[in-house]
Image (cartoon, coloured by chain):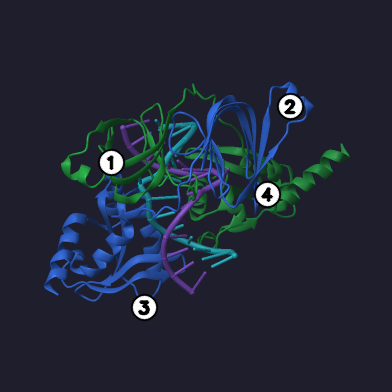
Chain colours: A blue, B green, C cyan, D purple
DNA sequence: CGGTCTATGTCGCAT
DNA sequence: ATGCGACGTAGACCG
């Protein structure tokens, strides 16, 4: 990894065109050839960048560029799309290289996949007598997170979110509309399950006859632990 | 901006929990207090981060941590959500600070506006005999990208996307529902036009009687060039 | 490899 | 502040 602090301007030409006027920035060159241009603020997103696979070529500026005060030009070209990032460097204020090695990577916990697995394992949380049909039940417009049957044997489609928002309700509505046309499944009831359900999403769901279910992730994990210990 | 290369492990507790095992990484501290943890590869997204507004506290490790080889502990806390990022540093390999100043920011030049202009100029791409009524036709719930009339004089509402996704179909559906209540416009047909239309979006659109139109941006630009050269 | 969905999405703009 | 749509979305998972 190479870290360069430099006074530079940057141009990107690819899926859009973008330009960064002359200013002092961090240029971060990773060992896979990718380049990140960061300012001293904002979020984790760089002002501009080139993702791998790509290659960097350092060029000597032509006369016109030299007259404009440019001392180096970096041209970073994407290997597949031919997108280009051109960094015109005026002054280098810092330049250092570091050996980092391969990163073991991030370990995550608490994402939607876990929730889905936990709810499938404890399907009774949907209500007494419910049974699991399957996770990721495929329909023509995409997979329904969980398909179950209630005590009376009627289909129940569950849309699962970490945070229950309006678009989740819209998604479930589309599935229900489609599934209710299938005589093998109809009638299909809807359950919108999430750790937190926004008031507007709850409103919309209930207005459409969709039941809302707030899930307690820690409690569900607790159930899981208890069950694990029993076996 | 402060750049630190260090052997460290990182823990995040917030909307989810995440852990980074001990390894050498770049720690990027921006002047607004935000922190980015980057490995030497992957994408522009850091392995872990804390976005502003947040505050960093450097702590002396307790005995247990010292025994584990930890020399510094940074606790970064988000000012609003109380999300925490904890960086446990074993060894610092580089540490430098740099004054960057405020960045003038990125200037973008997009593609979708151009697509709309091109389709409006070559409205026959909608079908023989079509005529343009206007771009950005205003309705109570927002502007329809293009309103046209077909050969029979019936209204045609066009939703334009670079990439045709399900939410684009939803958007057009809302417009059509509204516009079809207006006796001056009804009946209004829908056309979903994009450079790429996802199968599920096509499915949903056609199920709702909305016609799908795949646009070739380069070919349309070619038409434009030809026309430009004629005048 | 393409197709779809999730995301600590982020970002910007409207209300 | 909050909702909503776009993004050079990126990344994971699945056929």
- Decide which of A152, B79 is in the foreground and name it: B79
Kindly identify which chain the residue marked by label 2 belongs to.
A
Q: Which of marks 3 and 4 is nearer the N terminus?
A: 4
**Mark 3 nearby-residue class (10 Å; few <14, some 14–19, many ≥20):** few
The residue to which callout 3 is attached is: A184
Whether tag 3 and tag 4 are in contact, CB under 8 A, the answer is: no
The residue to which callout 1 is attached is: B86
User: Residue at the spot x=74%, y=48% of the render?
Assistant: B220
Disc 1 to disc 4, how far (Cα)? 39 Å
Vertical side of B80 occupied by D13: above or below: below
The residue to which callout 2 is attached is: A65
Badge 4 and badge 2 in a common chain: yes
- Decide which of B18, A193 is in the foreground and name it: B18
**On the picture, is D14 further left or further right than B64?**
right
User: Residue at the spot x=27%, y=32% of the render?
Assistant: B58
Badge 1 and badge 4 in a common chain: no
Question: Where does the image place residue A28, in percent across and percent down from the top left?
Answer: 52, 38
Badge 1 and badge 2 in a common chain: no
Q: Which of marks 3 and 2 is nearer the N terminus?
A: 2
The residue to which callout 4 is attached is: A82
Assign the C terminus of chain A to one quadrant of the image: bottom left
């Amino acid at each position: 990894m190479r870290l360069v602090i430099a006074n530079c301007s940057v141009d990107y030409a690819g899926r859009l065109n973008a330009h960064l006027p002359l200013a002092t920035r961090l240029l971060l060159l990773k060992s896979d050839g990718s380049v990140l241009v960061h300012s001293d603020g904002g979020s984790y997103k760089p002002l501009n960048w080139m993702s791998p696979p790509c290659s960097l070529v350092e060029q000597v500026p032509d006369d016109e560029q030299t007259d404009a005060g440019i001392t180096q030009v970096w041209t970073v070209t994407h290997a597949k799309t031919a997108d280009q990032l051109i960094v015109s460097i005026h002054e280098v204020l810092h330049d250092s290289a570091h050996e980092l090695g391969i990163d073991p990577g991030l370990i995550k916990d608490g994402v939607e996949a876990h929730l889905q697995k936990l709810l499938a394992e404890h399907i009774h949380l949907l209500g007494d007598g419910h049974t699991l049909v399957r996770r990721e039940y495929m329909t023509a417009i995409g997979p329904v997170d969980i398909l179950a049957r209630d005590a009376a044997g009627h289909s129940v489609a569950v849309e699962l979110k970490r945070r229950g928002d309006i678009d989740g309700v819209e998604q479930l509505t589309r599935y229900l509309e489609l599934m209710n046309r299938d005589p093998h499944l109809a009638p299909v009831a809807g359950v919108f399950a999430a750790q937190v359900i926004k008031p507007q999403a709850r409103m919309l769901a209930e207005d459409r006859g969709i039941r809302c279910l707030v899930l307690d992730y820690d409690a569900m994990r607790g159930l899981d632990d208890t069950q694990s210990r029993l076996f």
